Image (tube, helix red, strand yellow):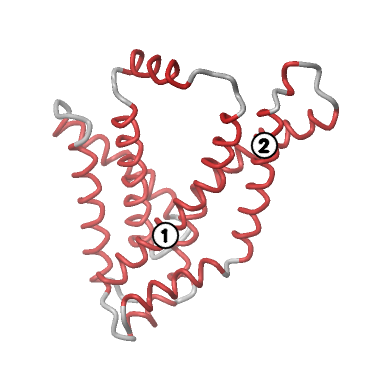
Amino acid sequence: MKLWNVFRMEIFKNLNDRFNMFMMLVLMCINIIGSIVIMNQQWLRQPTSFEEMVLSLYEISISLTVIFLFVYPFQMARTDYKNKVMSLMIASGVSRVQYYFVKVGATLLFSFLSFALLMIIPMIIMFNGVPVDTFEIVNFYVAVSGVSIVEAILILVLSWLLLFSTMMTAIIITKGKGSAIFVFFGLFILNGLIMDGLFGSIGSYFVPFISIAVMALIGILVLRRQDL
């Protein structure tokens, strides 16, 4: 089986996950509606009971969105272990290393899309209507944090990839069991202690790259030796 076909199969499987798609649609609608209410600056006057209800739902939805953005890729990554799909896929001629990178790619793609739909689009709608000088906010952030916006985005992306690679390794080690969440936190804390001890004096960009590579390597080595 060609890798492109495996990737397409992963995309098709994720798109047909009705529960997660429904949850994403509901959260996206609430987040967008809440953003529109805030964009219209309804907080500058006494809100109506309907507006209060919308803003309350918006606050709850944001909390649920953060949880969903963590649980969703975790659920996607462990599905193949639960459904015994991985063993069938390996039997079809796809190597474990190839399947690992296909799975990572598909899960990262859906994780980014879910983040864009649930967080980025509502934020664009919200801040598009707020009369604030964006350049003043940027200058203030740079002055306080000491890093540029580009550096901050890079750090966030590397941190996200590190969390994701740690999650994948935990899922592989536990074969998709529920205990993967505890292994994830254990690996993340252990990785932080080791990397801080070894490279504490080195720049903030170098260490996440090493951590991501180490986690990916551990995941691949464990997967290659697993009895599926």
The residue under label 2 is: 60
Instruction: Give the left or right position of residue 83, taking residue 38 as reference.
Output: left
Please name the amino acid that badge 1 sits on.
Thr
The kind of secondary structure element at disc 2 is helix
Quadrant containing the C terminus is bottom left
Q: Is residue 153 above or below residue 141?
A: below
Q: Is residue 11 above or below residue 50?
A: below
Residues 65 and 36: in front is 36
Residue 89: assigned label: none
Residues 62 and 169: in front is 62
* Residue 152 place in picture, x, y as percent: 33, 30
The residue under label 1 is: 107
N-term mark: 2 or 1: 2
* Residue 86 place in picture, x, y as percent: 39, 75
Quadrant containing the N terminus is bottom left
Instruction: Give the left or right position of residue 32, taking residue 53 as reference.
Output: left
Question: In which quadrant of the rendered view does residue 220 lie?
Answer: bottom left
Q: Residue at x 25, y 64 (%)?
A: 222
Please name the amino acid that badge 2 sits on.
Ile
